[in-house]
Amino acid sequence: MLLPSSVLITGASSGIGRALALAYAKPSVHLALSGRNEQRLKSIVHACADAGSRVDYEILDVTNKDDVRTWVTDVDKSAPLDLVIANAGISGGTGGGSETENQARMILETNINGTLNTVFPAADRMRTRKNGQIALVSSLASFRGLVGAPAYSASKAAVRTYGEALRGALQDDGIGVSVICPGFVESRMTAGNKYKMPFLMSAERAAGIIQRGVAHNEARIAFPFPTYFLSWFLGSLPPGFTDPLFRILPKKK
Ligand SMILES: NC(=O)c1ccc[n+]([C@@H]2O[C@H](COP(=O)([O-])OP(=O)(O)OC[C@H]3O[C@@H](n4cnc5c(N)ncnc54)[C@H](OP(=O)(O)O)[C@@H]3O)[C@@H](O)[C@H]2O)c1
C-alpha cells in the first residue's frame, strides 16, 4: 500500500478535490493545492494546515500549460511528489437544446489539456527518480457519449483512455497510474442538476474510496458499483441499440 508524503491536487478549491485534500491532510504530508477561486482555495488550505499538513497553494488555471509546468516542477523540487491528482474539471450540458461551440471547446480544453498540462511535468520529474503515482479524474460519463453532455462525456472518455494507456507506458519508469471514474458526487458541479442522481454520494465518501484505490495503485477506481456496472454495460452495447434510451435521459443544464 502506498502512503504518499507529498501530494499535489489540481481543482482543490471545491468538491472532490477539496475532500481529497482534507483526506490526505496529515502532519507528515506536504500538500500542494491549486484552483482559480482564491477565497475557496485559501479556506481549504487553512483547514489542511489545521490538520497538521505543510501546505503550498497556487492560484492557477490548468489550461495555462507554462504556469502549470512551472508550479508542478517547483513543488517537486521542494518536496518530491509521490502522488499527483489531475482533478480540475468543468462540466456543462445542453439543457435540452444543443451545446454551444464555446462551451464544448472550453470543456475539452480544461478537461483534456488541463489534465495533460498536469500529467506531463509530473511524469517528467517522477521518471528521473523512477517513483511516483499519477491519478487522473475521469467519470462514469466516459463509458458512453451522453446526448445531454456531449463535450463533457467526450472529454472524460479521452482522459480515461489516455490514463489507461499511460499506466502501461509508465510502468517501466516505476510510475503508477490510476484512472478515477466517479458516479454522481455532491459538489458545485452537480449542485444545479434538477434531475434525480442515482446513488449520489458525498464528496467525503468519494474521497475515501479514491484514497483507498490510489493507495493500492488500482488501474480503474470506478464507483459506486451499480452505476459503474450500468454505465459499462450500456457503453458496451451497439450505440444504435441504446440511442433511444440515451435520447430520453435528463439533460444537464
Ligand atoms: N461531481 C461529480 O458528480 C463528478 C462525477 C464524475 C467526475 N467528476 C470530476 O471530478 C472533478 C472535480 O469535480 P467536482 O465535482 O469536485 O466539481 P467542482 O466542485 O466544480 O470542482 C471543480 C474544481 O476544478 C477547478 N477548476 C475548474 N476549471 C479549472 C481551471 N480551468 N483551472 C484550474 N482549476 C479549475 C475548480 O476550481 P475553481 O472553482 O477555483 O475555479 C474546482 O476546484 C472534475 O474533473 C469532474 O469532471 C465529478
Image (cartoon, rainbow, N blue to C red):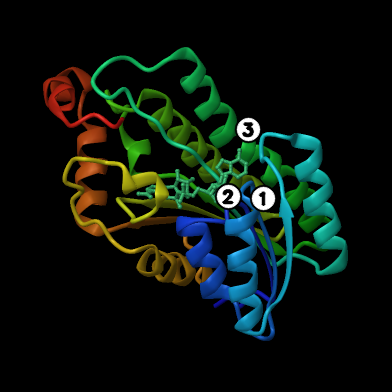
- The verdict on label 3 being within 8 Å of ligand 1 is no
**Mark before the other along the chain sequence, 2 or 3:** 3
Mark 1 vs mark 3: in front: 3
Residue at the spot of label 3: 113
Which residue is located at x 33 percent, y 37 percent? 143
- Residue at disc 3, secondary structure: helix
The residue type indicated by label 2 comes to Arg
Residues at marks 1 and 2 touching, judged by CB atoms closer than 8 Å: yes
| Type of amino acid under label 3 | Asn
Real-space Cα separation, disc 1 to disc 3, in angstroms? 19 Å
Q: Earlier in the sequence, mark 1 or mark 3?
A: 3
Task: Assess disc 1: are there few (<14), some (14-19) or many (≥20) residues with their C-alpha within 10 Å of its C-alpha.
Answer: some
Q: Residue at x 20, y 30 (%)?
A: 237
Residue drawn at (68%, 79%) of the image: 53
- Residue 5 to residue 95: above or below: below
- Residue 217 makes an appearance in the image: no
Which amino acid lies under the numbered mark 1 shown in the image of this protein?
A: Leu
Is 138 placed above or below 81 here? above
80 vs 184: above or below: below
Number of numbered discs visible in the structure rendering:
3
Residue for badge 1: 170
Quarter of the figure with the C terminus: top left
In the rendered structure, find residue 167 and report the number of the disc placed on it: 2
Q: Can residue 72 be seen in this view?
A: yes
Image-based side of 245 in relation to 201, left or right: left
